[in-house]
Image (tube, rainbow, N blue to C red):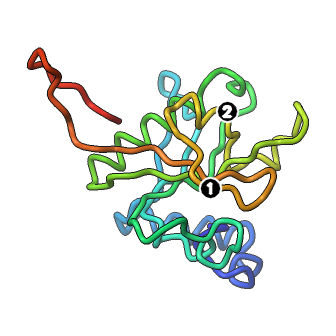
Amino acid sequence: MWWRLRRAEWGKGKGDGNRRALRALVESGEPTGLVAYSGWDPIGWIAVAPRGAYPGLERSRTLKPVDERPVWSVTCFFTAREHRRRGVTVKLLEAAARYARANGADCLEGYPVEPRKDSVPDVFVFTGLAQAFRKAGFVEVARRSETRPIMRRELGPEKRTTRGRKTARA
């Protein structure tokens, strides 16, 4: 809910209030995100929706829009501790690309962290790491801060190869 609410609203709803607000969004059918499972166990989550669903991005000087193009945005991740550093973030990004494309998006954007040092506490990388975005096919399109690139992945429609087979760009 960090990106969906004004800071005062988020602070007021911290904890249970923000959980209730997210549950209400999910129940409304509005795009909110995807859950990763290992068997029947949920192990990760990614927030993905049209950029307009995240007013907090509009207020950020660092993450302001790159251009007028309508994009979907990835704003947040969570991976269960025992599943971290196993590629879950990359799989979530790939699933988010398929989901966004299936819902009409041509472009998916993310706002990861590019740390200055090798180790960053997990709490500071809730928007993901740039290296995971690169592995999932994203490219940097802007950087207004040393540690915060804006990255995009094109989600064009299925294309036919010269041999007549379909290839998906997701």
The residue lying toward the viewer, choosing from 22 and 98, is 98
Residue 131 badge? 2
Residue 115 badge? none
The residue shown at (66%, 73%) is 17
Question: What's the residue type where badge 2 is placed?
Answer: Gln
Residue 36 visible in the shown view: no
Residue 143 visible in the shown view: yes
The part of the image, by quadrant, that contains residue 30 is bottom left
- Secondary structure beneath dot 2 equals helix
The residue shown at (32%, 55%) is 105
Residue to which mark 1 is pinned? 142
8 relative position to 98: left or right: right
- Asked if residue 72 is positioned above or below residue 11 in the image, the reply reads above
Residue 52: x, y in percent? Answer: 46, 72
- Asked if residue 74 is positioned above or below residue 81 in the image, the reply reads below
* Quarter of the image with the C terminus in it: top left
- Secondary structure beneath dot 1 equals strand
Q: Earlier in the sequence, mark 2 or mark 1?
A: 2
